[in-house]
Amino acid sequence: MELETLARAVSQELKRQGLMLVTAESCTGGWVAQMITSVAGSSEWFERGFVAYTNLAKREMLGVKTTILSRYGAVSEQTARAMAESALTHSHAQVAIAITGIAGPSGGTPEKPVGTVCFAWAAKKRDTISRKHVFSGDREAVRRQAVVAALQGLLNYLNP
């Protein structure tokens, strides 16, 4: 699905369910928030976005525990889950998306190659879910695929 079409579908679903979204983004640098707010009327379903690029920002802005970052690393499902749950705590939204990854071209390791992106979706009174994907392509391609996966994942999360 085209990115703009997907953003509209997510926006319609959030509006239909009467939910406000908060985003907690690292490697996508606010791209998910930008796509949601590109849809007219988004103040009805978008509450706020956090761009927490460094570990310090993840700790200070979102309250991600140092123990999670040291034990699992910034690019992990555990960190994505903590980011999503903390974004809910630090906002008035009912649903959250979190993304953390390695967009490249450097920064990868054998265990976490460039293109590794972790996602989490959380909501009040619902279980948080997380996923890890390894995308291919250059920095732009990895980031774009991550935005698509985050939005599609949210649609799936809202309609189990």
Image: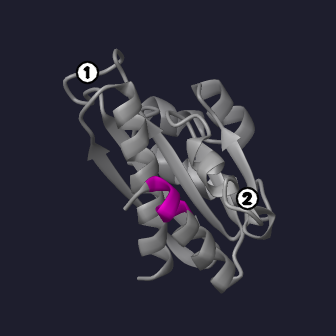
Residue 72 appears in the rendering:
no
Residue 109's spot in the image, x, y percent?
26, 21
Query: CB of mark 1 within 8 Å of CB of mark 2?
Result: no
Please report the bounds of the magenta region as a residue range: 3-7
Residue 139's spot in the image, x, y percent?
38, 26
Q: Residue at x 58, y 33 (%)?
A: 66
Alpha-carbon span between mark 1 and mark 2: 32 Å
Residue 55 inside the magenta-drawn segment: no
Q: What's the residue type where badge 1 is placed?
A: Thr
Residue 49's spot in the image, x, y percent?
70, 48
Q: In this view, does 112 lie above or below 147?
A: above
- Front one among 66 and 42: 42
Image mark count: 2
Q: Which residue is drawn at 61% across and 79% down?
A: 125
Q: Is residue 157 above or below residue 38?
A: below
Residue 117's spot in the image, x, y percent?
37, 41
Give SS at disc 2.
helix
Q: Which of the numbered marks, if any, corresponds to residue 89?
A: 2
* Residue ID for mark 1: 109
Q: Is residue 42 left or right of residue 131?
A: right
Q: What's the residue type where badge 2 is placed?
A: Thr
Give SS at disc 1.
loop
Tell me the quarter of the image containing the N terminus: bottom left
- Front one among 14 and 71: 14
